[in-house]
Amino acid sequence: MNELMPGTINLVSLVISLAVLVVGLVVWFFVNRASVRASEQIELLEALLDQQKRQTVLLRRLCEANEPEDEPAAERVSAGDADDEDGLVRLVAER
């Protein structure tokens, strides 16, 4: 009976090693999958931010083009500075 024990111990050790390897691979798969999804979401958010910046620039140009030309340019600049001094924010802050 003692002659069979070393062989079974090696077999049990091998099975435990394979089980640990399979569990490790499964955990790695899910962590890697979550990381890839997070990276894709970050890329999409950066693209969205870039598009929003371009839209903001276009909207500013459009608003400036549609402003009445009754006021001199100096008054428009001083009015813009007054808004900045009051602490009013024209746009949502970017992160």
Image: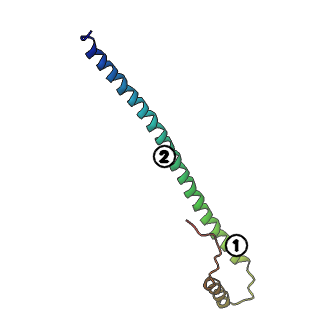
Q: Position of residue 68 (x, y in %)?
A: 75, 83
At label 1, the amino acid type is Leu
Give the residue at mark 1.
Answer: 62
Q: Nearest to the eye among marks 2 and 1: give it.
A: 2
Q: Secondary structure at mark 2?
A: helix
Determine which residue is flagged by label 2: 35
Q: Residues within 10 Å of mark 1 (few under 14, many from 20)?
A: few
- Which corner quadrant of the image does residue 73 belong to? bottom right
Q: Is residue 73 left or right of residue 20?
A: right
- When the figure is inspected, residue 71 is found, relative to residue 42, above or below; the finding is below
> Which residue in the rendered view is the most extreme toward the front?
1
Q: Say which residue appears at 24% left-offset and 10% top-offset.
A: 3
**Of callouts 2 and 1, which one flags the residue occurring earlier in the amino acid sequence?**
2
Query: Can you say whether 56 is above or below 25 in the image?
Result: below
User: From the image, which quarter does the C terminus lie in?
Assistant: bottom right
Cα–Cα span, label 2 and label 1: 40 Å
Q: Residues within 10 Å of mark 2 (few under 14, many from 20)?
A: few
